[in-house]
Image (cartoon, rainbow, N blue to C red):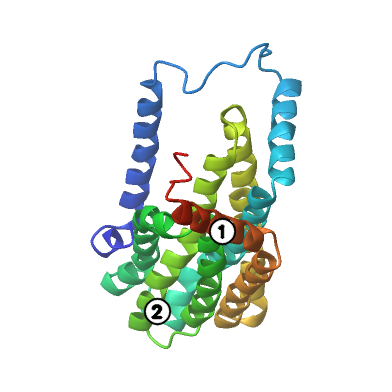
Amino acid sequence: AGLALAVLNPASLLALDALSFVASAVAVRGIVRAMSKRREGQLPLRPRVIFADIAEGVRFLVRHPGVRTMTIVGSVQSFAGGGFVALMVVWCDRILHIGTSGVRFGLVWGAWGIGGLIAAVGLPRLLRRMPPAAITLYALPMSAVLGIVTALAPGWGLAALSLLVWGSAYVLVIVNSISYRQQVTPEELLGRVNTAGRMLSWGVGWTLGSIVGGLLGNQYGVRTAMVVMGAFGFVAVAIAWTSPLRRIAAAHNAADDSADDSGHDPLHA
């Protein structure tokens, strides 16, 4: 979409975005069978039943140390990202002086998304080399540093490059968290736990970050606000490195070393 802004006007892109939702709805209509097993004794959907299901998902999320920590970290990072992205158009116009349309604006705006695509494609390879907890522990500091570096970029070229790399580290943390949650959550709870996690990260974290970023930008200026929002990434780093994630990563590595010594694959033992 960022690159398309160079040749299309925003109204056309919004129309294409709306059509993508229509296509998604048509695709969902094509699902003809249940995606999971029906729970025994499942009650008809009523508000009380829905809230009880949500509460069950939240309880699992809170009690599982890995899922809980990655959700908290994801929420803090979404807070930082929401505030940053809320100011990006103004940043491009007033700080980078590239306006809000054209090739340069499209490259800067699209760099973040391309970085996210790189992260999504590269995650499976990383997971073959290290556990999910370790990926989060090492990607978070990179994301925090790059958030501030991007805000301080003196020109649009360096800004686009920083956004590309930051987008990779930022989205890597998010996608890795979702992947881990899907691996460790029982199938019957997966939908509820995923919904709770996404609401906390995107619904709460991203929304609050957008509001706070806008308020800070209005009060202290765009660049200062973006640096402050980027610095919240270090809060996520502190939470992660003082959490059970270090123990979870160490236990996974110890299990791999033990499997290598015995000549057995722990996944197929």
Query: Which residue occupies the extreme bottom position in the image?
Result: 154
Nearer the viewer's eye, disc 2 or disc 1?
Answer: 1
Residue 82, horizontal then vertical, whole percent: 57, 62
**Mark 1 surroundings: few (<14), some (14-19) or many (≥20) residues within 10 A:** few
Q: Indicate the quadrant where residue 4 lies.
A: bottom left
Residue 146, horizontal then vertical, whole percent: 49, 77
Mark drawn on residue 159: 2
Asked whether, in this view, residue 37 is left or right of residue 11, the answer is right
* Label 1 element class: helix
Q: Which quadrant is home to the N terminus? A: bottom left
Q: Nearer the viewer, residue 183 or 200?
A: 183
Asked whether, in this view, residue 245 is left or right of residue 267, the answer is right
* Label 2 element class: helix
Whether residue 113 is visible here, answered yes or no, is yes
Task: Establish if 14 lies above or below 22.
Answer: below
Task: Establish if 144 lies above or below 194.
Answer: below
Task: Establish if 95 lies above or below 247.
Answer: below
Task: Please name the residue shown 33% across and 51% down the image.
Answer: 13
Q: Nearer the viewer, residue 61 or 91?
A: 61
Residue 130, horizontal then vertical, whole percent: 46, 60
Q: First in sequence: mark 2 or mark 1?
A: 2
Q: Nearer the viewer, residue 33 or 29?
A: 33
**Separation (CA) of disc 2 from disc 1:** 40 Å
Residue 34, horizontal then vertical, whole percent: 47, 18
> Dot 1 corresponds to which residue?
254
Query: Which residue occupies the extreme front position in the image?
Result: 262
Query: Which amino acid type corresponds to the residue marked 1 in the rendered image?
Result: Ala
**Mark 2 surroundings: few (<14), some (14-19) or many (≥20) residues within 10 A:** many
Asked whether, in this view, residue 156 is left or right of residue 212, the answer is left
Task: Please name the residue shown 53% across and 48% down the image.
Answer: 180
Q: Indicate the quadrant where residue 216 lies.
A: bottom right
